[in-house]
Amino acid sequence: MRNQTSLEGKRILVTGGTTGIGRATVALLAREGARVLTFGRHRQELDEALSQAGGGRGSADGLTADVATRDGIDQVFAAVDEKLGGIDVLVANAGVSAEPLHESEEDEWRYAVDTNLTGVFAGARQAILRMIEQGGGHLLFVGSISAENKSAGESVYAATKAGLQAFAETLRKEVQDKNIRVSVIQPGSVATPMQGSGDEEMQAAIDRHEMLHAEDIADAIHFMLTRPERTDIVNLRIEPRVQK
């Protein structure tokens, strides 16, 4: 009766899969039999992520590219066509933090918008065009509770994540008749490099149940991707028990 969706052989692009949530997601999906392609800006982090993802039933491959640029998106989807031969799932995870607007140089806040929002639009468009041709697919966007919390110090970041939320919920209605599912996961505090904290400090926060492991979010992403095809998890909010 459940008809859970198998990830065996699924062609999955994970953006920003070289650190944090992305890296944990790449490793888990590859273990579950998916053919995963990912990318990031730095070769060393990419190599580490691919090494961590090795040994599963599936595979993981990658390249260095920047989701904030047109050239980066073109490079990534050329690799999608060459290495995967198409795309069944897009996990749009790439993102950067940002200082408050008045404390940022213009190039800095513009780069955050280009990464967290414009790059998501561009990647989603390329994925949708391919999914329409093949008869369907699944888009999963990694958002943030910042879109709702609107905490001081997060003016730019919260705006990009709120924009992502509105984009995804509206896009879902636009591609329903194309057999494309759209989901958003909204993590709370997660122990990743984006936090800007040391490993010991983050581990202490995890012990106090104030932060989650990146693997906790990867597990939730796996859950969302493996629901029956009749099911669309529109939003999933996941926080540590003691969310600040």
Image (tube, rainbow, N blue to C red):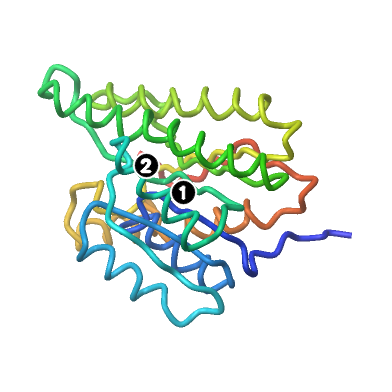
Q: Is residue 23 left or right of residue 97?
A: right
Residue visible at 50% across and 39% down in the picture:
126
The x, y position of residue 133, in whole percent, is 67, 42
Residue visible at 67% across and 30% down in the picture:
175
Residue visible at 55% across and 30% down in the picture:
168
Q: Nearer the viewer, mark 2 or mark 1?
A: 2
Residue visible at 19% across and 23% down in the picture:
100
The x, y position of residue 46, in whole percent, is 28, 63
Q: Is residue 202 left or right of residue 38?
A: left
Q: What residue type is labelled 2?
A: Ile
- Looking at the rendered image, the quarter that the C terminus falls into is top left
Please tell me whether mark 1 sits on a helix, a strand or a loop: loop
Q: What residue would you read off at disc 2?
A: 73
Q: Which residue lies furthest to the top in this view?
A: 102
Please tell me whether mark 2 sits on a helix, a strand or a loop: helix
The x, y position of residue 78, in whole percent, is 42, 51
Q: Residue 159 carries which label?
A: none
Q: Which of marks 2 and 1 is nearer the N terminus?
A: 2
Q: Residue furthest right?
A: 1
191 in relation to 142, above or below: below
- Looking at the rendered image, the quarter that the N terminus falls into is bottom right
203 in relation to 184, above or below: below
Query: Which image quadrant is residue 131 in?
Result: top right
The x, y position of residue 239, in whole percent, is 47, 45
Q: Which amino acid does label 1 sit on?
A: Arg
Query: Which image quadrant is residue 96 in?
Result: top left
Q: Nearer the viewer, residue 104 or 211?
A: 104
Q: Gap in Å between the C-alphas at discs 2 and 1?
A: 37 Å
Q: Nearer the viewer, residue 29 or 156?
A: 29
Q: Which residue lies furthest to the bottom in this view?
A: 55
Q: What residue would you read off at disc 1?
A: 241
**Category of crowding for the residue at label 2, using alpha-carbon neighbours closer than 10 angstroms: few (below 14), some (14–19), many (at least 20):** some
